[in-house]
Amino acid sequence: MSPMDSLNYYKRILNCGFMAMDPNNGHVKAWVGGINYKFFKFDHVRQSKRQPGSTFKPFVYATAIENDIATPCDHFIDEPVTFGPEDGVLQSWTPQNADGKYSGESLSLRRAMGRSINSVSARLMKQIGPRKIADFAHKVGIQSPLAEVPSLCLGASEVSVFEQVAAYSTFVNGGDKVDPIMITRIEDKDGNILKEFFTISKPVITDQTAYLMTYMLRGAVLEPGGTAEGLKRYACAQGNEIGAKTGTTSNYSDGWFMGATQNLVTGVWVGGDDRSIHFRNINLGQGAKMAMPAFGLFMDKVYADRSLAEIGYKKEPFKKPDNFSFDFNCGTVAGQDSIQVISPTQKPKDEGLLQ
């Protein structure tokens, strides 16, 4: 191989970042910074930051739920949403869906997130505003600066796998943000404890919102057309509650997958170290193809290990708050009608609902 052939080959190698954490106590259980440290001395879990694509959308939806703007049962129309000068952009911008089409369907919030419909995320962004969404993401665990622009709703600002796992864990941990911890204590050669480290946790969102988000995340696996429906092929999804979100960036450069169970939250990123490396089409370059298999295989091995089951890493439902009250048949929430169809050409019945 010539030097140019070698560079061409080397740059096309896909790398990976993988992290799994217990959301209940912040203990990091798996951290894979790359495919081979001998040749790629760079940590793709915390050092690397890339656009998260649609894996950022749950923060948009959660902001709407936390602020009583919408519920998982509220319906939105899949149709174009345009941002203009009134939204802080110089030129008008209309986000497209992944297939470039708008179905015109009325979709529940859960189904829209499960199918990763860009137009619904854009509708929420237009109604809520980027500042509130950025503030919410920072509150639940994102540390990187976030550009307060409309494209934030589609994951335009770069974040790390480390931050994503920490933020998703807040949903599973009943609304308490827990900082990831890798070392619990340091001992000398005789077993004497020299230093102990403890989990830092604090409530940042309501337990109601947190549990509703685990229900929303399960939609990617269970809703018709969900982007993580393929996870059903793996044993880990059988008889288990799994929340998931796929992510794919522009030009199919980055593939993301976020998976959540009651005892493990996992983040996977796959892509080229050089950002110009990408797939030619979404059939190959989507997060469900690039990143989801790593999660599925990992979780299958976790559940197959009996020693892990003995210490609590087994299939179980997400913990529901004691005072939780929501009709998942889309009836009522706190006595109020939860069915709304939101369209730019039709105001909601309660005009104060979406201020």
Image (tube, helix red, strand yellow):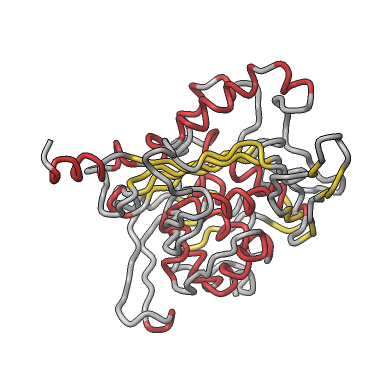
160 up-or-down from 32: above or below = below
User: Which quadrant of the view contains residue 267?
Assistant: top right
Camera-side residue of 161 and 91: 161
Camera-side residue of 132 and 69: 132
151 up-or-down from 168: above or below = below
User: Which quadrant of the view contains residue 222?
Assistant: top right
Residue 34 x, y percent position in the rendering:
45, 40
What residue is shown at x 31% (from left), y 76% (from top)?
Answer: 92
What residue is shown at x 67% (from left), y 42% (from top)?
Answer: 28
Any part of residue 327 in sight: no
Any part of residue 165 in sight: yes
- Furthest toward the left, the residue is 2
Residue 261 x, y percent position in the rendering:
66, 36
Camera-side residue of 237 and 78: 237
What residue is shown at x 47% (from left), y 68% (from top)?
Answer: 346
Q: Which quarter of the rendered picture does the N terminus lie within? A: top left
What residue is shown at x 38% (from left), y 53% (from top)?
Answer: 104
In-image side of 268 versus 299 (left or right): left
- Furthest toward the front, the residue is 189
313 up-or-down from 120: above or below = above
